[in-house]
């Protein structure tokens, strides 16, 4: 595989890990949540990340690379998600949503890291657009979390 394809595969695989972390994090959040509305939203966020993983893996294969395992996590980001259980306090929903928003910021930050000018030049426009589109979806879901936090915590 030529150098630019190798770099693109590396970038896409790192985003597979970000989404795998996100999936496992929301599975943890579903177990912790008591509110059925939150469980439904968290399930939808898992669907988004599974779709992102599928798109990323398809592109990695198309480039001749090997996608990392579907359940492979980076460890450090997954640990942040797992610390979710430790953040639970008197106001379960507030703590859960605060933790999820914080972790969404981390996931989006990982996408941002790959969109900086130096790296942007490493991937072609098609992959750059895919990364931007997925980042936009994660941002939409983070905003939905913030709105849910306001709605649930103000009542």
Image (cartoon, helix red, strand yellow):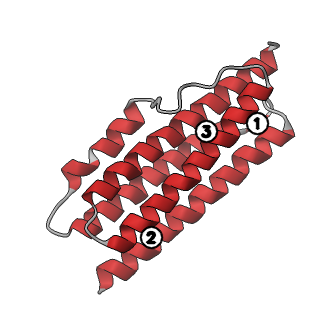
Question: In the image shown, does 88 or 46 lie closer to the viewer?
Answer: 46
Closer mark to the observer between disc 3 and disc 2: 2
| Residue occupying the point 30% across, 78% down | 153
Confirm or deny contact between disc 3 and disc 2 (CB under 8 A).
Answer: no
Residue 53: x, y in percent? 61, 40
Element type at mark 2: helix
Which residue is tagged 2? 146
| Residue occupying the point 59% across, 36% down | 15
Question: In the image shown, does 50 or 19 lie closer to the viewer?
Answer: 50
Reply above or below: 14 against 82: above
- Give the quarter of the image for residue 94: bottom left
State how far apart marks 3 and 2 are (Cα): 23 Å
Which residue is tagged 3? 113
Q: Earlier in the sequence, mark 2 or mark 1?
A: 1
Tell me: 68 left or right of 77.
Answer: right
Q: Earlier in the sequence, mark 3 or mark 1?
A: 3
Reply above or below: 109 against 140: above
Quadrant location of the N terminus?
top right
Q: Residues within 10 Å of mark 3 (few under 14, many from 20)?
A: some
| Residue occupying the point 48% across, 52% down | 105
Q: Residues within 10 Å of mark 2 (few under 14, many from 20)?
A: some
State how far apart marks 2 and 1 are (Cα): 29 Å
- Give the quarter of the image for residue 16: top right
Tell me: 147 left or right of 86.
Answer: right
Element type at mark 3: helix
Reply above or below: 74 against 36: above
Tell me: 123 left or right of 99.
Answer: right
């Amino acid at each position: 595989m030529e150098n630019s394809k190798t770099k693109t595969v590396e970038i896409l695989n790192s985003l597979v890990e970000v989404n795998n972390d996100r999936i496992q994090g929301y599975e943890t959040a579903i177990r912790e949540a008591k509110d059925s509305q939150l469980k439904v939203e968290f399930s939808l966020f898992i669907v988004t990340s599974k779709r992102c993983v599928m798109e990323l893996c398809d592109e990695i294969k198309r480039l001749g690379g090997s996608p990392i395992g579907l359940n492979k996590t980076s460890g450090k980001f997954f640990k942040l998600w797992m610390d979710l259980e430790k953040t639970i306090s008197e106001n379960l929903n507030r703590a859960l949503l605060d933790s999820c928003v914080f972790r969404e910021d981390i996931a989006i930050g990982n996408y941002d890291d790959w969109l900086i000018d130096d790296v942007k030049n490493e991937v072609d426009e098609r992959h750059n657009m895919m990364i931007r589109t997925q980042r936009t979806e994660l941002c939409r879901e983070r905003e939905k979390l913030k709105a849910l936090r306001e709605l649930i915590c103000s009542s």
